[in-house]
Amino acid sequence: MQTHAGADAPIDLSQFARVFFDEAGEHLAELERLLLTIDVGNPDDESLNAIFRAAHSVKGGAATFGFADIAAVTHELETLLDRIRKHELALKPEMVDAFLAAGDVLASQLAKHRGESTESIDPTDVVARLKSLTTGDAAAPKARRVRIEFTPDANADLEKVLLGIRDSLAFVAASDSIVIDDGSAKETLPPTPSQGRGSSDDGFGFFDDAPGQPVEAKKDDGFGFFDGAPGKPENTPAHDAALNPGRRASDQPDFNGGVVGRRGHDKHLVPAQGDSSSIRVSVPKVDQMINLVGELVITQAMLAQKVAKLGSVQGRTLANGMGDLERNTRDLQESVMSIRMLPMSFVFNRFPRMVRDLAGKLAKQVELKTVGESTELDKGVIEKIADPMTHLVRNSVDHGIETPEARVAAGKPEQGTVTLSARHQGGHIVIEVADDGRGLDRAKLIAKAKERGLEASDAMSDAEAFNLIFEPGFSTAEKVTDVSGRGVGMDVVRRNIQSLGGSVEISSALGHGTRITVRLPLTLAIMDGMAVTVGGETCIIPLNSVVELLRPGAKDIRGVSGQGNVVEVRNEFLPVVDLAEALGATRDTSRIPVLVIIEVDGVKTALFVDELVGQQQVVVKSLESNYKRVPGVSGATILGDGTVALIVDVAAAVKLARH
């Protein structure tokens, strides 16, 4: 085979498919957001056009990559939207429902093509609904006269023009898979240039007069428009290749590493034009960079420890340099960690649709308010907090908000409100789920707990009574629904939040509503900790759990019959937990113990430790990939001297010691 300038060179198309999937998902999310916020009675043109553009973008990309099923659904979706934005049809609630259902179908189809699911929702019903809404009560469209004017453009990019034409016509190639109404006539068109060919056509087939007969271009490449003009185009290899039929593109490309013939310089084409101030970077690359920064933090700590042992003038000079290195390392770590930070809108955006559907199912009127959507949180934390947040919101709608009749009888407006908020507080993010519903009945909670044999008394505090709902299988719901009420989930919610190093608190007022507050660390990769020694081993207590440190006197610690030891701190008695005992170690009794006051789920506890080492930044390493889960331990880290220290899961350690 001979090669020449402009010859086809293989290019991996899977990278473009990945971009399409990512962007299509974003378009569908935007489509759903706009549909849930649009004023159905008086929609503005800007919102209608934005909804249409989102659907059109998905359709164009799907047709380009040969996803005929997606193109078929978006075609019907786009047709109805086009009539609405041209004011030929009025937007109705049933249309919004159909659009949302179509979005669900498209999301399932995308997941199937991406390999994330083996099945997708059958689009037949949705397509039929869209067609019915398009033609059901439509007025006859006004006759329009179309006038087309052509303006020569000396700087036009021929290749982009041809790509645009191919994208527009690609839907015709997928026409065989379009579902049509019964009784409709279906005509078979002659194959378009993109159909039935097994190799790539650099000219996209538009220049074929007969099979195997190239069209000879006139010498006047500017068609007479550009003679003498400074912008007159030259005979580029791309232009020549467009006039010379070559290999044609497969209409079923392989996105799992398959390649198709394209011109060599095509690999520099950007598949989609986005914001020039941002780039797409794969998560593994970001994780690799964070791991390298973590190793740099460990190396810096090792060097600092070695320099501290030097007492000479050179040692002091090195110590000054190490101080600069520490500051630069921390700045670098914070900058790199910010790359993994995502706004809370990634979690909050899934709830408007869910609340809308649940409220309709339960015959309730619920308004969802969100505050602090731009508050940022580590991507790893966001992925793990989504499910617990979903359960909390579902509970608020199902158990918290009353029916319109009950609300009116209680002197409340018919419409209930669920508020999601997020804000930064120190090294934490605070997320709240609040509702103005019926609230928690303290007496009912305690009675239910006694009935199930749980430790409960009328003297327990409100916080302790409300925390009973986190017990496995605990539920006060009088009626079990397919939404919630079976007593499963809230214990899992707390367990998942605590596994992230966070805590959850409940406050409620009967008849006025409930507020659930979740506190989480901003990141899971690198954290500040308090190093302590326990039984001769160094352990790390997360600094965000530490309230204060103190060295008690012998008279400060008192024994309580059947309850262990307590310590009085400023007129408050706190339970004392021996951390060595909780971790299965032996405490050094020759030392005067130190008490570390921690706070978990709003409850303070004093931890006995042998000695304080100091505060330091540590890189969190998971143990569960190589070892089974160790009770009371959430991970490990490498200290400056190269030794391994365990990171204490304070909530689990306290629970172990108490039970």
Image (cartoon, rainbow, N blue to C red):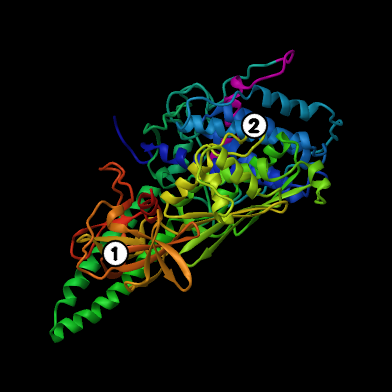
Looking at the picture, tell me which residue is in the foreground, 2 or 86.
Answer: 86
Q: Which mark is residue 481?
A: 2
Q: Amino acid at mark 2?
A: Thr
- The secondary structure that dominates the magenta segment is helix
Is residue 63 at least partly visible in the picture?
no
Where residue 210 is drawn, which disc sits there?
A: none
Foreground residue, 177 or 21? 21
In this rendering, would 338 be left or right of 648?
right
* Quarter occupied by residue 29: top right
Does residue 178 belong to the magenta stretch?
yes
Q: Above or below — where is 108 with respect to 315?
A: above
Can you tell which quarter of the image residue 650 is in? bottom left
Mark 1 and mark 2: span between their CA atoms? 48 Å
**Is 353 in the magenta?**
no
Q: Which residue is mark 1?
A: 609
Label 2: state its secondary structure.
loop
Q: Of circles 1 and 2, which is in front? A: 1
Residue 609, horizontal then vertical, whole percent: 29, 64
- Of 242 and 234, nearer the camera is 242
Chain part drawn in magenta: 162-185
Quarter where residue 642 is shown = bottom left
- Direction from residue 618 to residue 435 in the image, left or right: right
**Image point 57% across, 56% down: which residue?**
461
Instruction: Mark 2: give few (<14), some (14-19) or many (20+) Cα within 10 Å.
Output: few
Location of the N terminus (image quadrant): top left
- Please give left or right for residue 613 compared with residue 564 in the image: left
Seen as rendered, the residue at the extreme bottom is 313
Confirm whether residue 403 shows in the render: yes
Of the numbered discs 1 and 2, the one sitting upstream in the chain is 2
